[in-house]
Image (tube, helix red, strand yellow):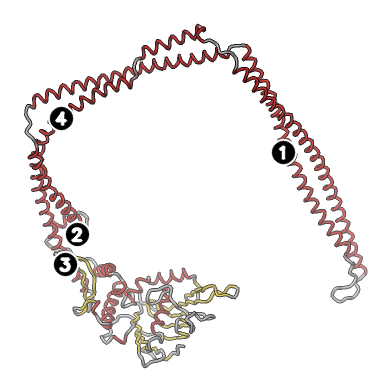
């Protein structure tokens, strides 16, 4: 795809008041610093992507006054004819003030493509379909690739240009071990394994030394047979105690049944005592008297509650009817106002336009219409008056009923309060009589004596609690476990000597195995370094073969023999950071040519600071050269067709 800038028209953009110029395959823009050369480039980038040559979206694009404030009342406009594969298209952006109630409230951007208005988002999508912003920067900004792209991104682009690169020979075994991993990933795996193995190997010698020092500290153990017999006797006693403990838990179910039986008898004893206490005629009559008093109070409370509910209903009905009455009264007042207005209006017998007296027939019709209107208003008013009176009568009736209910509630409340006070006094007297009645002698009751006898017999059979019996077993077991621990400690010491000797042999064998594994990994890591050196040579050769003048350093060979990725352009032995301005332009053109060919896109190449460039121009695309010249006060645009001078105010 070939993209060429054919013409640009700029109004009120940065320092350019107005500028219209054509472009050819090679166009030169000259002027002193500040004359607007870079502003032309910024205007083109603003038109395309809404940014300036520094990649900034928020930049000062409007002309400024002497106080460094945007000049008001200006319309900023950039329009360009861009030819895409031989077909010309007109792109336009306008940046206008947003005025609300006479005050500046910001700015608005409008876009057009071939005179068709577009939303900003539609405009951006259209441009992006032609060429993405990143691709445009790569192809049109000579400094973007080497100065603005991070080196990993530059390296990725170069490897993409180089395409598929062959595999170095002689590393078949190494490659078969990758199992889908990259060389770098496999190197990380091996390095991690080596680190882990070294750490494990570093720990073995101290462990062997520690075990050997432990062997020297152990005392010689004699008469192991007697010690073993003693330990066996202790274990037998502990086992018997454990059996006894299990038996106690097994018997606990029966014991719990007996406890439940005793508790049940105690509950029955309390119930019998309660029966004896309440089993006399006087107490029953007193409780019946309290129940009768409660029943009277409860009945009066129910009556009062019913009256409260009826009052709520009546009150709601009154408010509802008053709302209807007020609405009808409002309508009646409105009709009255209309009637008075119509009745007081004078009959107009003259024409409002010419002032001549109207025909008698017209006057009569107007008077008849007025009479008919007044009659209708009277009829409507009478009907509303009737409805208002009916509503008021119903309200009066409901208010009377409401007052009656409230009077009833007041009387019922007074009666209820008196009854409650009377109940309180009566209950105090009755409760005192109940509390001061004589206590019965339970021991004279045969049933009570029978229950008490069952409880006494059950408690004798129950014996000590499970917790007390278990504590005795546990105390004895604790003493035996202490004796067993002393015996086991001696046996453990003997076992430890035997185990430590075996462990020392195992660690010494493991130490040899680790040393061999580390050596195997070291060999593979050396193979990886050799592979990377061979591969890096292939990659650099493949990448650099694409460029005419520029070479790239893609690998950094470190002192320890390892290789790190990098990416830096080289020209005649100089790294990009050491190149002159002209050399950087020359290298940038070389890179732009390769990228343009690789992506199949040719775009206008803006070359700033062209005055510092004295090397051959080898660009394979349209070029626009920006030259600073202290002798040229006003911007000059030169191309192959003509020379024209534009005044930039």
The answer to whether residue 369 is left or right of residue 405 is right
Q: From the image, tell me which residue sits under label 4.
A: 488
Which mark is on residue 558? 3
- Front residue (pair 406, 621): 406
Looking at the image, tell me whether mark 1 or mark 4 is earlier in sequence order: 1
> In the rendered image of this protein, does residue 349 appear above or below residue 584?
above
Q: From the image, tell me which residue sits under label 2.
A: 183
User: Quadrant of the image for the N terminus?
Assistant: bottom left
Residue furthest toward the bottom?
631
Label 3, residues with CA under 10 Å away: few <14, some 14-19, many ≥20:
few
Looking at the image, tell me whether mark 2 or mark 1 is earlier in sequence order: 2
- Give the foreground label among 2 and 1: 1
- Front residue (pair 260, 87): 260
Whether label 1 touches label 3, CB < 8 Å: no
Whether label 2 touches label 1, CB < 8 Å: no
Q: From the image, tell me which residue sits under label 1.
A: 312
Give the CA separation, mark 2 to mark 3: 18 Å
Give the CA separation, mark 2 to mark 1: 89 Å
Q: Name the residue rendered at 38%, 77% in the picture.
A: 53
- Give the foreground label among 4 and 2: 4
Q: Which quadrant holds residue 35?
A: bottom left
Badge 2 element? helix
Badge 4 element? helix
> In the rendered image of this protein, does residue 303 appear above or below residue 635?
above
Looking at the image, tell me whether mark 4 or mark 3 is earlier in sequence order: 4
Looking at the image, tell me whether mark 2 or mark 3 is earlier in sequence order: 2
- Front residue (pair 424, 574): 424
């Amino acid at each position: 795809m070939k993209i060429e800038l054919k013409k640009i028209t700029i109004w009120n953009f940065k320092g350019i008041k107005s500028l219209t110029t054509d472009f050819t395959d090679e166009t030169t823009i000259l002027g002193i610093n500040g004359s607007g050369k870079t502003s032309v480039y910024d205007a083109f980038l603003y038109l395309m992507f809404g940014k300036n040559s520094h990649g900034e979206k928020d930049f000062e694009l409007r002309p400024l006054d002497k106080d460094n404030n945007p000049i008001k009342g200006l319309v900023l406009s950039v329009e360009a004819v861009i030819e895409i594969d031989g077909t010309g298209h007109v792109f336009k952006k306008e940046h206008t003030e947003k005025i609300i109630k006479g005050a500046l409230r910001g700015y608005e951007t409008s876009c057009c493509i071939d005179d068709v208005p577009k939303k900003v988002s539609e405009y951006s999508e259209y441009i992006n379909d032609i060429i993405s912003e990143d691709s445009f920067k790569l192809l049109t900004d000579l400094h973007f690739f080497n100065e603005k792209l991070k080196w990993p991104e530059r390296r990725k682009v170069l490897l993409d240009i180089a395409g598929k690169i062959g595999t170095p020979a002689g590393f078949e075994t190494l490659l078969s071990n990758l199992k889908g991993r990259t060389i770098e990933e496999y190197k990380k795996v091996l390095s991690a394994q080596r680190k882990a193995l070294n750490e494990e190997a570093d720990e073995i010698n101290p462990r062997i030394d520690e075990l050997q020092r432990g062997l020297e500290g152990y005392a010689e153990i004699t008469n192991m047979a007697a010690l073993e017999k003693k330990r066996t006797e202790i274990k037998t006693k502990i086992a018997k105690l454990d059996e006894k403990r299990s038996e106690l838990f097994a018997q606990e179910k029966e014991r719990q049944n007996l406890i439940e039986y005793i508790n049940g008898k105690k509950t029955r004893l309390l119930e019998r005592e309660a029966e004896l206490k309440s089993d006399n005629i006087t107490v029953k009559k007193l409780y019946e008297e309290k129940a009768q008093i409660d029943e009277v109070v409860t009945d009066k409370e129910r009556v009062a509650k019913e009256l409260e509910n009826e009052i709520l209903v009546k009150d709601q009905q009154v408010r509802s009817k008053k709302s209807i009455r007020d609405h009808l009264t409002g309508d009646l007042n409105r009709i009255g106002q209309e009637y008075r207005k119509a009745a007081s209006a004078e009959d107009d017998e003259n024409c409002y336009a010419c002032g001549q007296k109207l025909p008698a027939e017209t006057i009569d019709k107007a008077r008849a219409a007025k009479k008919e209107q007044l009659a209708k208003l009277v009829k409507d008013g009478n009907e509303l008056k009737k409805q208002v009176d009916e509503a008021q009568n119903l309200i009066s009736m409901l208010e009377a009923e409401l007052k009656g209910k409230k009077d009833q509630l007041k009387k019922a409340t007074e009666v209820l309060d008196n009854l409650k006070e009377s109940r309180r006094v009566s209950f105090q007297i009755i409760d005192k009589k109940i509390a001061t009645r004589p206590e019965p002698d339970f021991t004279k009751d045969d049933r009570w004596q029978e229950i008490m006898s069952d409880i006494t017999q059950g408690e004798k059979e129950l014996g000590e609690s499970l917790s007390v019996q278990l504590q005795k077993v546990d105390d004895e077991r604790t003493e035996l476990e202490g004796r067993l621990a002393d015996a086991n400690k001696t046996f453990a010491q003997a076992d430890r000597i035997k185990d430590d000797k075996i462990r020392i042999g195992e660690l010494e064998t493991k130490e040899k195995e680790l040393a061999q594994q580390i050596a195997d990994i070291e060999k593979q890591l050396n193979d990886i370094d050799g592979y990377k050196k061979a591969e890096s040579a292939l990659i650099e050769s493949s990448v650099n073969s694409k460029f005419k003048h520029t070479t790239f350093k893609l690998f950094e060979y470190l002192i320890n023999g390892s290789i790190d990725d990098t990416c830096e352009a080289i020209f005649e032995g100089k790294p990009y950071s050491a190149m002159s301005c002209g050399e950087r332009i020359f290298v940038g053109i070389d890179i732009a040519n390769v990228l343009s060919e690789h992506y199949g896109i040719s775009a206008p190449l803006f070359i700033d600071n062209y005055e510092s460039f004295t090397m051959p121009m080898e660009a394979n695309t349209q070029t626009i050269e920006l030259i600073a010249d202290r002798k040229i006060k006003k911007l000059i645009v030169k191309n192959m067709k003509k020379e024209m001078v534009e005044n930039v105010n």
